[in-house]
Amino acid sequence: MLHMLEVMDKEPSLRAIWGAALLFGVAGYVATRLRRWLVFPALALVGVLAWMELGGLLDPQLGPAVMREAGIWYVAQAGGALALAVILCVPSVRSNTRLKLAAPSCCGSVLFVKSSSSRGSLGALR
């Protein structure tokens, strides 16, 4: 007699898959908006995420068991979440505007003050 083992207790839930894909996608979007070359590490992280999440589906024993227990909808949702992560990373490379990191307004706005008195300038504020 064959025993059926529970397979889905070891697989990530759809909420975890979508959350991780959204997190990596937004992080990749922000990183590639700061520096365009950061698209390569961002896509590498998305690739590692894809391998961790969908790598079990390539196993000859585990893959069919997951599809039988969770259904094809689970596989489609996992693939869609990973596609979203890639889609968030790549288009930000083509945009011409980059995000600029600015100094806080309390620190960098007043560095030199010119006095209106006859003594001249006061110099840099500390």
Image: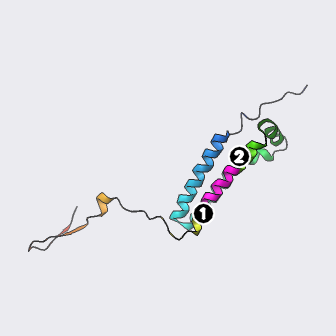
Q: Amino acid at mark 2?
A: Gln
Q: Pick the quarter of the image with the C terminus.
A: bottom left
Secondary structure, mark 1, is helix
Prevalent SS, magenta region: helix
> Magenta residues, as a range?
80-90
**Residue 61 coordinates in the image, percent (x, y):** 84, 40
**Image point (63%, 45%), residue name:** 18
Secondary structure, mark 2, is helix
As drawn, the label of residue 59 is none
Q: Amino acid at mark 1?
A: Val
**Residue 79 coordinates in the image, percent (x, y):** 72, 50
**Image point (56%, 67%), residue name:** 36
Relative depth, front residue between 113 and 98: 98
Which mark is first along the chain, 2 or 1?
1
**Image point (71%, 36%), residue name:** 10
Q: Are marks 1 and 2 in contact (CB under 8 Å)?
A: no
Residue labelled with disc 2 = 77
**Image point (63%, 40%), residue name:** 15
From the viewer's perspective, is residue 95 above or below residue 82? below
Residue 30 lies in the magenta stretch: no
Residue closest to the far right = 1
Residue closest to the far left = 118
As drawn, the label of residue 39 is 1
